[in-house]
């Protein structure tokens, strides 16, 4: 009898934790896909999934931290492209690769700083601020690039996106490092955990001595920086800085974070959860590809998963409230 | 006396809890029945049943001789029972007229609202209650007190036989409360009956004829107000004799030095020329009406609100406190008057709340959190402050009001404060927890902590404090020592009537 009760308790705990539920879903999909397509578990396919992930996952880390603190950033897609274009133009102007990388990152940081200052110091709400910034930055990079992609980037730069170590491309390593470090910091670092307090009750957080404005500016800078990193990696991968890349990316990243347990009102979520959310989206896209399903279905399925995740959250909340 | 409402054997349960357990009550025409009880006693559920919001599992309601069964609050209102809940149902974006006659606007052909008639009817209605407000005024431009009064008038406009009021004075000033009571007495002469829920026992004695006490869903007592004392009511509410609601003062702290000195605190239009001293081990009360500026003074001391000028001295040395972090470093704790708004992190677990201001103490070298140490500390804190919870991982919003307040106390005790500024300690707190909190404060004082209590409840200040400063429109009107404590004296100062001499000990700032 005790064993059964304990099992139920474990199951409740497992499903209670969003991350565990996602891991289970991923395992189930994995099992189903392996039986449908022998290619699924192949080394090349798994690598492809991770490569697709390497654009969204790093940004999702920043985004989920922002969401937890009650913020939001719709400009990440534009920032991603901006960093790539900035680096590309620097390379074409003859600057060495390391300097160009720095230029790209600084460009991204600039956007983040602008977002942070507008939200924290001027007090405009993040949605409107980053919505405006999204358009401004996209326009800016179009102007700088003359409306065309920046081509012929030197090898010393493209190696960061195309290089391989032990059979795994560099971007995958970068992504994994960012996710792992991000998760550890958000679980354990006092500094990073302040975000939960800010998202939980911003006014109370201020009263307990947290420098809320500083955190907000930091978060926007971090998110933009990560978008810049992703932008540089994807530019290096394709050897050219596209001016249209990243459109619509912000919504995918936010979806990943929310599937992973974050809420738009703040105070909840985790880096690991956001990673799993992004992974789930990538796996489903991959699975549908392998099964020969139209690309359009992917968007539909992603949307269904998002709503399902949020509905489950809502039901759980109501159940818990009823019990109290 | 004719019985207007006869509720018999009402029972109502929810998953896991029997909220109302076989309650019967009778109400006569023109009678005012006070309904009191701690949070969770079942009062809200009972009035939900009477008001038609919920159908009871068992029981009968007989209104004016006829047995009735409500399947909606609308039905109840049409039958003659109206409820004014604590949460306002007003629409900010609409006018006073449209709110009072919500869904009952006078209409003409094709459902078109007859605006002239609407405003005229509202004007007449407002005049009947001596309310000088323009019916066209948008509700969002009213003060909280005006909104609360409007909510009550809205219910009265349905001409109920029984009007149920749930904590109607929580946001009202003294003057507005007097106004409300005057109108209740007027309506009672017209045979309207009232059920009046309140946490303020003093109001029971002011306005009610009879009082009914609920505890754990059951009727724990029902008496004529003349036949009971406050202590009787408290005992009925809590189920145990609370001999000392305001706590017992242990030995006075040995040293008598000043721990906090405030000089020349000014903020234009908010507070002016505020000077006072707080000694170690002393409990100082700041009395005054709502809006007297005391909260703003408290928040200015800890750097949350701005000040135009002023100096703060801790243990004789001047300190500059420009933000909450500075205050925490100097070990001054400020416990906010609205814990829901800016005190607690309701969606977060208890353990994260308790460590919030003192979180630096729980980190290792690389500023990572030490969860083992945190859990140990939180467990001992929960025991020390007698917080009722099944687990330290429980989200604070699931705790009762009294326990939430204790979490707030535990939170700030964690910084080992030398000075505690407690704003409205008993707001939304049940009697049992109130007594616990007062005792905690008195014990802290015995250990040398200087405590400032900001409150509008005179009985609370008189029961807990050693000394009281009365504020009026941002200025300190006078000081009352323990031996001279009296409600009249303090009220007079708070109303700005008497300009009493300041005693020698606090005029050292000049």
Image (spheres, grey):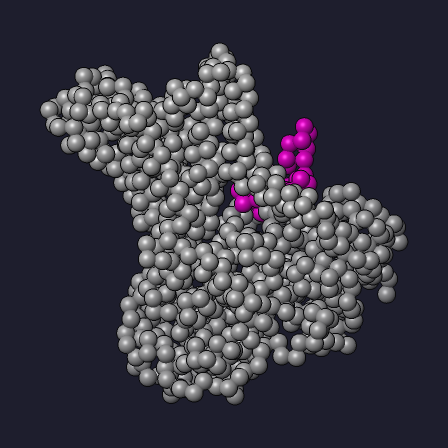
Snapshot quadrant of residue B11: bottom right
| Magenta stretch, residue numbers | B91-118
**Residue A40: percent from the left, percent from the top?**
47, 19
Instruction: Give above or below for B408 relative to B397.
Output: below
Q: Front-most of A296 and A126?
A: A296
Give the position of the N terminus of chain B as an image quadrant: bottom right
Residue at 31%, 40% (x, y): give it. Answer: A222
Residue at 28%, 25% (x, y): give it. Answer: A164
User: In the shown orientation, is residue B407 left or right of residue B50?
Assistant: left
User: In the shown orientation, is residue A242 left or right of residue B449?
Assistant: left
Q: Front-most of A280 and B242?
A: A280
Residue at 70%, 55% (x, y): give it. Answer: B44
Q: Front-most of B337 and A27?
A: A27
Instruction: Give above or below for B242 relative to A313.
Output: below
**Residue A202: percent from the left, percent from the top?**
42, 51
List the single residue furthest toward the left. Answer: A94
Snapshot quadrant of residue A307: top right
């Amino acid at each position: 009898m005790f064993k059964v009760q304990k099992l139920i308790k474990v199951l409740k705990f497992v499903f209670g934790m969003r991350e565990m539920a996602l891991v289970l879903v991923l395992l189930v999909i994995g099992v189903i896909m392996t039986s449908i397509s022998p290619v699924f578990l192949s080394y090349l396919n798994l690598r492809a999934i991770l490569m697709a992930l390497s654009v969204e996952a790093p940004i999702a880390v920043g985004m989920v931290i922002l969401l937890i603190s009650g913020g939001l950033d719709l400009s990440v897609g534009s920032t991603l492209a901006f960093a790539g274009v900035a680096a590309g133009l620097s390379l074409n102007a003859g600057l060495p690769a390391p300097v160009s990388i720095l230029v790209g990152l600084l460009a991204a940081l600039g956007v983040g700083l602008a977002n942070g200052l507008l939200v924290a110091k001027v007090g405009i709400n993040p949605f409107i601020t980053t919505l405006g910034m999204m358009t401004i930055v996209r326009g800016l990079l179009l102007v700088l690039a003359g409306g065309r992609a920046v081509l012929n980037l030197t090898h010393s730069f493209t190696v960061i996106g195309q290089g391989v170590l032990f059979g795994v491309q560099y971007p995958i390593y970068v992504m994994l490092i960012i996710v792992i470090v991000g998760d550890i910091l958000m679980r354990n670092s006092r500094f990073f955990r302040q975000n939960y307090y800010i998202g939980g009750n911003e006014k109370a957080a201020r009263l307990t001595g947290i420098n809320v404005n500083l955190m907000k500016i930091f978060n926007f800078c971090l998110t933009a920086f990560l978008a810049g990193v992703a932008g540089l990696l994807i530019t290096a991968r394709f050897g050219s800085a596209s001016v249209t890349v990243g459109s619509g990316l912000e919504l995918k990243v936010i979806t990943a974070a929310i599937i992973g347990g974050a809420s738009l009102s703040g105070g909840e979520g985790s880096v690991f959860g956001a990673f799993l959310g992004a992974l789930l989206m990538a796996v489903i896209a991959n699975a549908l590809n392998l099964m020969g399903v139209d690309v359009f279905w992917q968007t539909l399925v992603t949307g269904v998963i998002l709503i399902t995740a949020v509905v489950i959250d809502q039901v759980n909340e109501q159940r818990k409230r009823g019990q109290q | 006396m004719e019985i207007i409402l006869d509720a018999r054997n009402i029972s109502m349960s929810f998953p896991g809890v029997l909220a109302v357990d076989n309650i019967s009550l009778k109400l006569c025409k023109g009678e005012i029945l006070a309904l009191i009880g701690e949070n969770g006693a079942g009062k809200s559920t009972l009035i939900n049943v009477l008001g038609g919001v919920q159908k009871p599992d068992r029981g009968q309601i007989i209104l004016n001789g006829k047995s009735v069964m409500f399947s909606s609050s609308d039905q109840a209102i049409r039958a003659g029972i109206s409820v004014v809940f604590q949460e306002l149902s007003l629409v900010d974006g609409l006018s006073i007229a449209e709110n009072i006659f919500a869904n009952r606007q006078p209409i003409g052909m094709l459902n078109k609202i007859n605006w002239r008639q609407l405003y005229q009817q509202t004007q007449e209605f407002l005049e009947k209650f001596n309310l000088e407000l323009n019916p066209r005024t948008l509700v969002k431009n009213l003060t909280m007190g005006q909104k609360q009064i409007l909510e009550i008038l809205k219910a009265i406009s349905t001409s109920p036989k029984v009007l149920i009021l749930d904590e109607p004075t929580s946001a009202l000033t003294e003057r507005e409360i007097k106004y409300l009571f005057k109108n209740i007495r007027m309506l009672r002469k017209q045979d309207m009956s009232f059920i009046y829920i309140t946490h303020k026992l003093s109001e029971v004695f002011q306005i009610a004829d009879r009082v009914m006490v609920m505890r754990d869903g059951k009727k724990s007592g029902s008496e004529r107000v003349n036949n009971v004392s406050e202590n009787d009511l408290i005992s009925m509410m809590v189920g145990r004799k609370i001999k000392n609601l305001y706590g017992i003062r242990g030995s006075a702290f040995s040293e008598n030095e000043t721990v906090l000195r405030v000089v020349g605190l000014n903020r234009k239009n908010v507070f002016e020329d505020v000077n006072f001293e707080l000694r170690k081990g002393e409990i100082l009360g700041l009395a005054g009406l709502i809006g007297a500026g005391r909260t703003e003074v408290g928040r200015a001391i800890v750097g949350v609100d701005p000040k135009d000028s002023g100096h703060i001295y801790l243990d004789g040395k001047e300190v500059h406190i420009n933000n909450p972090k500075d205050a925490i470093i100097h070990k001054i704790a400020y416990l906010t008057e609205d814990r829901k708004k800016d005190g607690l992190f309701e969606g977060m677990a208890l353990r994260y709340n308790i460590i919030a201001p003192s979180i630096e103490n729980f980190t290792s070298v690389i500023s990572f959190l030490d969860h083992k140490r945190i859990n140990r500390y939180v467990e001992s804190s929960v025991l020390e402050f007698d917080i009722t919870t099944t687990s330290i991982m429980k989200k604070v919003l699931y705790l009762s009001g009294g326990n939430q307040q204790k979490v707030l106390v535990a939170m700030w005790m964690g910084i080992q404060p030398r000075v505690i500024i407690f704003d409205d300690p008993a707001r939304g707190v049940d009697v049992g927890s109130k007594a616990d909190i007062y005792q905690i404060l008195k014990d802290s004082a015995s250990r040398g902590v200087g405590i400032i209590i900001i409150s509008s409840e005179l009985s609370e200040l008189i029961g807990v404090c050693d000394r009281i400063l009365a504020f009026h429109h941002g200025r300190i009107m006078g000081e009352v020592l323990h031996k001279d404590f009296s409600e009249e004296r303090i009220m007079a100062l708070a109303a700005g009537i008497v300009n009493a001499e300041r005693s020698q000990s606090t005029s050292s700032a000049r």
